Amino acid sequence: MSTLQGTRVTWLGHSTVLVQTAKGTNLLIDPFMAHNPTYPKGFVLPQKIDYILVTHGHMDHMADAGPVADRLGSTIVAIYELADYFAKKGAKSTIGMNLGGTVQLDDVAATMVEAKHSAGVQDESGTHYVGVAAGYVLTIKNGPTLYHAGDTAVFSDMKLIGELYQPQLAMLPIGGHFTMGPKEAALAVKLLGSKRVLPLHFGTFPPLKGTPEQLAALVGPEVEVVQIAPGDSI
């Protein structure tokens, strides 16, 4: 299987992923830690998180974005309306973007791609429109191309993501109920053409019943399904 060329990817339970490039850029995707039962106990984030990427407005993907950004001076990257929401909540540095757009985050080109999911944020004032759900393709200079799908169903245009970006590692939800399960994720792998998959969004709560073993049985030996514990890295 292809290596990540000096990039380290650490799964922190649920859909929270820490990406550290060989150059030293640290990106945290969908931070859900304080109330995440699968967040690894005792894990300490690096003292520098340059960017926090949020796929959509549900609290199990963004609950800790503001606190981490405040503590570590991070810039929050999100779809335009969600970035505006963070700014109004006090975030000092945000980048708002939209589907199909790319922003340069030091040595990482972050492209926002489609996802099929709802996206409203709920707070003490009710439910708010904060854009639509998205995923990210991270093209790392002198490194790999990674795809974090966020929360999504399988959709046929994943083939376009594969054709355009050829992600070497696809990070896909597999739990079912709120996202695609193993059967649909196996089709997503085929559409993307990726040969390495990191399963996300499973086992955190009782309804999320899909497992990496089920996905591995469906994709066959030609695709590596990475099976690591929260806090471990590839």
Image: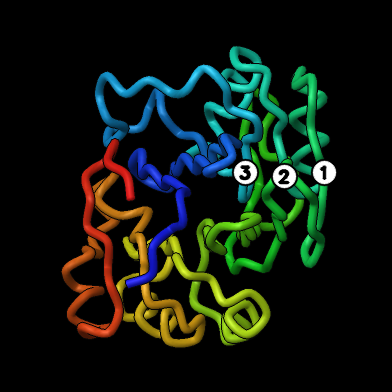
Measured from the top left, where is residue 81 in percent x and y? 81, 44
Measured from the top left, where is residue 130 in percent x and y? 75, 45
Measured from the top left, where is residue 6 in percent x and y? 45, 49
What is the number of the mark on residue 96?
1
Q: Is residue 83 left or right of residue 140?
A: right
Measured from the top left, where is residue 86 in percent x and y? 74, 29
Residue at the image position 32 percent from the left and 72 percent from the top: 1
Measured Cα–Cα span from mark 2 to mark 3: 5 Å
Can you identify the residue that label 2 sits on?
A: 78
Mark closer to the chain start, 1 or 2: 2
Q: Amino acid at mark 3?
A: Val
Can you identify the residue that label 3 sits on?
A: 54
Q: Are marks 2 and 3 in contact (CB under 8 Å)?
A: yes
Q: Are marks 3 and 1 in contact (CB under 8 Å)?
A: no
Query: Does 174 sit above or below residue 13?
Result: below
- Looking at the rendered structure, the secondary structure element under dot 2 is strand
Q: Residues within 10 Å of mark 2 (few under 14, many from 20)?
A: many
Where, by quadrant of the figure, is residue 33 drawn?
Answer: top left
Measured Cα–Cα span from mark 3 to mark 1: 11 Å
Q: Is residue 136 visible?
A: no
Q: Are marks 1 and 2 in contact (CB under 8 Å)?
A: yes
Query: Does 41 sit above or below residue 217?
Result: above
